[in-house]
Amino acid sequence: MNATRTRPKRLVHKAAPQLKVLYVCTEVYPWLKTGGLADVSAALPPALRLAGLDVRVLVPAFPALAQAASVCGAPIALPPGTADGPGPRADTAGTAAPWLQPANWHNLTTADASTCTPQVYLLHAPGLLDQPGNPYTDASGQPWPDSARRFAWLGWAAARLGTGLDATWQPDVVHGHDWHTGLSAAYLHALAERGQRVPATVFTIHNLAYQGIFGPEVMAPMGLPASQFGLRGLEFHGNVSFMKAGLQYSQALTTVSPTYASEITQPEQGHGLDGLLRERQAQLHGILNGVDGAVWDPQADALAPHAYSASNLAGKAVAKAALQIDMGLQADPAALLFVVVSRLTDQKGLHLLPQVVDELVQRGGQLAVLGEGDATIEQALRACAQRHPGRVALHKGYSEALAHRMVAGGDVIMVPSRFEPCGLTQLYGLRYGTLPLVRAVGGLADTVTDCSLENLADGSASGFVFHRLDADDLARAVRRAFALHARPADWQAVQRHAMGLRFDWARAAQAYAGLYAQLAQDVL
Ligand code: ADP
């Protein structure tokens, strides 16, 4: 496997005693990625290790992850997992073989394995987690019928690792990410109620809109105590909610930006869980995501061939010309090139785009979209491309390489989201001098500063920000982008400022480390 990531050698400051953290997630870039969570899970565990924590990762052995492990690391034998106690019943295991094997992926992510690459536990569950395709949904976008079982296993495995399954390594903190890991806290809570010593628990919300809700019939086979099926447990309007389990039973909650941490405590963005989140507000922290400089760096991007920097932007013009050719747009260096790299979902506010496309083109701009998802949004964008050949282009699909070339070659990256927990593409845009045009929600509000006259005057401007989720407000931001572009010196000053901003993982890792330390102290 070709490792695209290299990291600088850094000295590790080892706190004594070194806290052990089990990081539980379902996707890791570059092996398995459906969204920003994969980028986070590739970058945060190594950053935590650099911050001096002993972090290990638990992931399901989905085929892409199992394949990566089989190529790169020999599994080490662990005692077979047992299906006793709270947890999926024996019939869900369907096998007496070891279902949990740690695999050392040290040579997957970096040459600097000794310092920052975490060991990975790969959760095997034959017939359950080894199905091909997207880990969450079938080809038509419907959740897999055995989703509850899949992620109950993951939660149970986390709880077992948290309580001594690996005699050589027992975590002080179990840190789950998104609903797929929500049951780990529920199982640990059940074990604690039986008198077992359990680690501290942290649960991070990457997107509250996806909650993992299943009918009440899943409760019994999951092996959780019936008492958890209630208002103060994981019951949600008569169903089982994995997200609510994580929110209810974890000691600390985090989400990926300060603004989203506050937005989700209100009905508009609370997805029915705002009441619980208001109750737990004192334990809810907003910790902004970062940019992995080993993957996203305009001076050394393995997937975007034309390097450039804030002090020498010549390569950016070449990247733009190449992108125009790639996307079938007219070769037009003067055209203001707007790009979108996104899942095409209701969340992303892209239904507004077709309403501003005509004006964008009339003003001499171009639009290139890379994305896949909702058929209605896709059709509307395709109609725009047909109406404006050579000026608007849609590439339907998922392409990591094209995403890098879009971020490098664009002038403006649009993220007009309805809601946005953090958003990574605007951070990549900033780093690449591709000015973000964003709606002021969630992490977008926390990371982009509008090019208003006063912000231009004090040098803080880094992009274009609009507020209302309507085409008029979006169109005004598009006009601001054209107005700034007509003043090349100001445009470049904003670009340079944006490229100098640093949203790095070291800062986020320090914040998580502080939280872990506080929790571990309370547990001890
Ligand atoms: P979300 O997790 O809600 O999809 P983020 O902005 O947090 O949004 O992260 C999206 C990640 O997925 C980024 O790394 C972005 O570059 C990538 N991405 C989104 N759509 C595509 C696509 N069609 N092709 C390649 N990468 C994509």
Image (cartoon, rainbow, N blue to C red):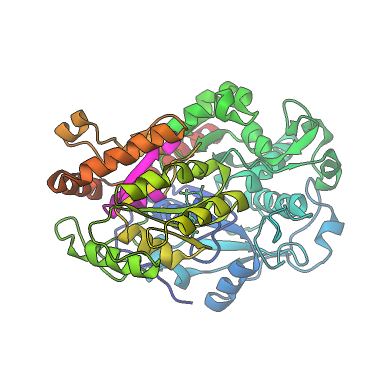
Q: Would residue 411 be found to the left or right of residue 70 on screen?
A: left
Residue at point 62%, 63% (across, down)? 122
- For the C terminus, which image quadrant? top right
Q: Is residue 474 above or below residue 161?
A: above
Total numbered badges shown on the rendered structure: 0
Q: Is residue 15 visible?
A: no
Q: Is residue 491 above or below residue 253?
A: below
Residue at point 58%, 38% (across, down)? 208
Q: Residue 439 or 215: which is nearer the viewer?
A: 439
Q: Residue 46 or 67: which is nearer the viewer?
A: 67
Residue at point 68%, 55% (across, down)? 141
User: Residue 460 lies in what quarter of the image?
Assistant: top left
- Whether residue 471 appears in magenta in the rendering, the answer is no
Q: Is residue 312 above or below residue 288?
A: below
Residue 296 image offset from top left, x and y in percent: 35, 59
Q: Is residue 396 visible?
A: yes
Residue 496 image offset from top left, x and y in percent: 19, 49
Residue 411 image offset from top left, x and y in percent: 29, 53
Residue at point 65%, 43% (across, down)? 182
User: Residue 71 lies in what quarter of the image?
Assistant: bottom right
Q: Residue 484 or 119: which is nearer the viewer?
A: 484
Q: Residue 287 or 14: which is nearer the viewer?
A: 287
- Whether residue 427 appears in magenta in the rendering, the answer is yes
Residue bounds of the magenta highlight: 425-443
